[in-house]
Image: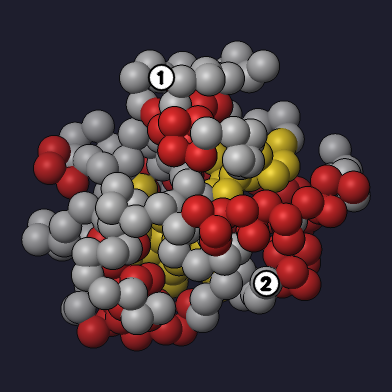
Amino acid sequence: MITEVACQGADLCQELSGSTDTSFTRVYEGDPPSRRIFSTGRFEVLADMSPLVVGHLLVLPKQHHLSFARVIADDHHELRSLLAWLVPRYAATFAPPLVLEHGSTEEMGRQACITHAHWHVLPLSGDAVDDALGSAGLPYLDLAGLHELGREPWPSHSYYFRLYRDRARVYLPAETNPRQYLRSIVGSILEIETPEWDYSLVTRKDHLRLTMRMTASWTASRMEP
């Protein structure tokens, strides 16, 4: 059982702590019994509970953080090892992975929709996401590497993060951006009608179950420490 999680009440935190009374267990009723795909000392890889597409995964820190910028500021070496293990397997199973994140802070107010840091991993083109966010007029900064996400101002600033084919970019959210904004962007790329990309409205259980079957062999090859 995981003991590093420090938050209480947030559903993801409860699930990581080993609780059997979570949204996942209530929705899926034991089929499958778990959505866990892989675990390291500090991270979990799960199937998204309401996947937008087959292969929609989450990467989460076991320790409670509101953003991966804070995770990386603390120590990014194990995260790099995890990516080195995950990316080739994901690409061979689905497609080259796109990583998206809505980085949160305690001061976000109405935009504070993230209660535990998580990356969305999707088999989509990062260029399509850039086109959509660019059309929305969001300012951005290209990062020289993943380590720069751990530098100020990002650990204490709200942001949208995109990582694709080793190209990292940070977008600055607008005050008018709604909650689940990145899910809505992905939904538009996948031609999912509004509001069916909302995780609380449509679950797509078949997507999760197929994702679990397609990734079942990944744990046969363990990541090197």
Q: Amino acid at mark 1?
A: Cys
Task: Looking at the picture, tell me which residue is in the foreground, 74 or 10.
Answer: 10
Q: Position of residue 155 (x, y in %)?
A: 38, 42
Q: Position of residue 188 (x, y in %)?
A: 31, 77
Residue 122 lies left or right of residue 80; in this view the side is: left
Marks 2 and 1 sit apart, C-alpha to C-alpha, by 33 Å
The residue under label 2 is 94
Q: Which colour style is shown? A: secondary structure
Task: Looking at the picture, tell me which residue is in the foreground, 149 or 211.
Answer: 211
Disc ID at residue 20: none
Q: Earlier in the sequence, mark 2 or mark 1?
A: 1
Residue 137 lies left or right of residue 47; in this view the side is: left
Q: Position of residue 46 (x, y in %)?
A: 60, 44
Q: Residue at x 13, y 38 (%)?
A: 109
State whether residue 181 appears in this view.
Answer: yes
Q: Quadrant of the N terminus?
A: top right
The residue under label 1 is 7
**Residue 144, picture quadrant:** bottom right
User: SS for tag 1?
Assistant: loop
State whether residue 147 appears in this view.
Answer: no
Q: Residue at x 52, y 76 (%)?
A: 124
Contact? badges 2 and 1 (CB < 8 Å): no
Give the vertical position of 135 relative to 222 (above or below). Answer: below
